[in-house]
Amino acid sequence: MNLVIIGFMGTGKSAIGKILARRINYEFIDTDQLIESERHQKITQIFREEGEAFFRSLENKLARELSHADRKVIATGGGWVLEPENLQLSRINGFIISLTAQPEVIYERIKHETHRPLLAGEDPLGKIGEIMGQRESLYRNADLIVDTSLRTPEQITEEIITELTRRGIVNARG
Ligand code: S3P
């Protein structure tokens, strides 16, 4: 069983995923990082030089590979949910955790960052609202949905572990 974390950019997938993995003794995997290290290219460069569709094909290839994995916490990129097959594959051996946050909170978290090509334009807050609106129903397609707007990654991780333990997905020692 894996724990697969989906959600919009800046909802805390990587930060929370890392803490969660450490706490339950699973391996942590970040799909963006894995793609960057396999290609020796940053995401912005892949988008710029090969285009978004190519990046999505790399995500899909990874989804296929990870459907054979076990005891991993997998933080996905925000657009993982755009390809329906990715989630279907994630579900084969995975429990899906969706993280959400208010657009204004996301904007505050990402406003000084430069590594997200989809938010690089003139009006990042407007873009956040627009893309989030398009994807909202996809992010609801999860076993557990947790809002990360008002609490720290540590507090949110505790809540997730409590819920996973209650449902018998993990025990406190993993
Ligand atoms: C994307 C989110 C990014 C990264 C890429 C595209 C998206 O990941 O995969 O820039 O389409 O939402 P994070 O959610 O980790 O920022």
Image (cartoon, rainbow, N blue to C red):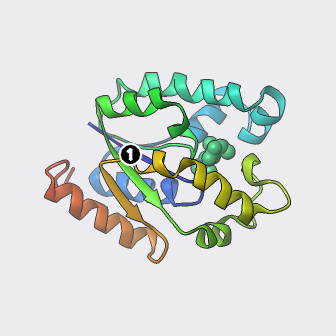
Q: Where is residue 144 in the image (x, y as percent from the top left)?
A: 31, 54
Q: Where is residue 113 in the image (x, y as percent from the top left)?
A: 74, 61
In this picture, is 16 found above or below 107? above
In this picture, is 163 found above or below 42? below
Counting every numbered tag in the picture gives 1
Q: Which residue lies furthest to the bottom in this view?
A: 150
Lateral position of residue 114 relative to residue 103, left or right: right
In percent of the image, x 50 and y 43: which residue is there?
76
Give the camera-side residue of 53 and 152: 53
What secondary structure is found at the residue carrying circle 1?
A: loop
Lateral position of residue 172 relative to residue 123, left or right: left
In percent of the image, x 74 and y 33: which residue is there?
41
Any part of residue 172 in sight: no
Lateral position of residue 87 relative to residue 23, left or right: right
Any part of residue 66 in sight: yes
Q: Position of residue 36 (x, y in %)?
A: 66, 35
Disc 1 beta carbon < 8 A from ligand 1? no
In this picture, is 74 found above or below 97? above
Q: Name the residue under label 1.
A: 141
In percent of the image, x 66 and y 72: which residue is there?
108
Lateral position of residue 158 relative to residue 107, left or right: left
Give the camera-side residue of 146 and 174: 146
